[in-house]
Image (tube, grey):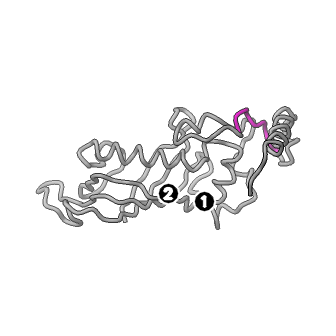
Amino acid sequence: MIFGFAGLDAVRACLASASQAPAGDLGVAGAGRVREGLLRPRLRGEGQAGKTAVTGVSDILSLTGISWSTDADRAVGDLSMLDGRFDKAVPEAAVERFLEEWVMNDGSLDFTSVRTVDRTVMRDAVVRSVTVRTLVSRDPIVFRVAVDAEGVCYEVDRRSEQVLRGDARKRRPITFAFDLRRDDTSTKAWTVIAADVQ
């Protein structure tokens, strides 16, 4: 479906009047105001997080009618229309940033609070997709995401450095489960707080 400029102008006018309406007048109980920038082109990653944000709402997760328990990925997509921090590119950027740090730290997770019995080494990771699986916590907001990637990933014994699982020289598909916490105190928007290689 193609929308002409007249259609976009109508949507902009509607959003402009809604953003100046008193809290609660947006057709959603308790909804606050939508900041300017909702219809601007979306940028990859953190830049999008600051473009739009809903203010004056105590529970932003309640602004979608989509069930968090049955379709969290779709619910996040729905919220992204109101708040750029939920745009798919923003959590994807957090995952990519985490994987880059993992590789830069000699392929070890030891730079984080995530601890593993053996050392899980990551090299040359390329993210293929990020899917929000579940809402773990509402306050603070934490999502569990499934990440399909490709790279070199293996586990070594911390004392002997012997490879225990995986191949230190072969790229392969990798599935991760990450817990992402919304971080309102930094420009990153989302922070990885738990990681699991499957």
> Which quadrant of the structure image shows residue 178?
bottom left
Q: CA distance from mark 2 to mark 1?
A: 9 Å
Q: Position of residue 158 (x, y in %)?
A: 18, 54
* Residue at figure coordinates x 30%, y 65% from the top left: 172
- Packing grade of label 1 (10 A; few <14, some 14-19, many >=20) is many
- Which amino acid, by three-letter code, is at mark 2? Val
Is residue 32 found inside the magenta-colored segment of the image?
Answer: yes
Cβ–Cβ below 8 Å for labels 2 and 1? Answer: no
18 with respect to 79 (left or right): right
Q: Assign a secondary structure to mark 2.
A: strand
3 with respect to 173 (left or right): right
Q: Which residues are magenta?
A: 30-38
* Residue at figure coordinates x 77%, y 50% from the top left: 3
Q: Position of residue 74 (x, y in %)?
A: 65, 60
Q: Position of residue 153 (x, y in %)?
A: 28, 59
Q: Assign a secondary structure to mark 1.
A: helix
In terms of depth relative to the viewer, which is nearer, 4 or 102? Answer: 4
The quarter of the picture where the C terminus appears is bottom left
In terms of depth relative to the viewer, which is nearer, 188 or 149? Answer: 149
Earlier sequence position, callout 2 versus callout 1: 1
Is residue 62 placed above or below 54 in the rendered structure?
A: below
Residue identified by numbered label 1: 73
The quarter of the picture where the N terminus appears is bottom right
Is residue 130 placed above or below 190 in the rendered structure?
A: below
Residue identified by numbered label 2: 130
Is residue 153 placed above or below 188 in the rendered structure?
A: below
- Packing grade of label 2 (10 A; few <14, some 14-19, many >=20) is many
- Which amino acid, by three-letter code, is at mark 1? Asp
> Does the magenta stretch mainly form a helix, a strand or a loop?
loop
Res. 89 mark: none
> Which quadrant of the structure image shows residue 10?
top right
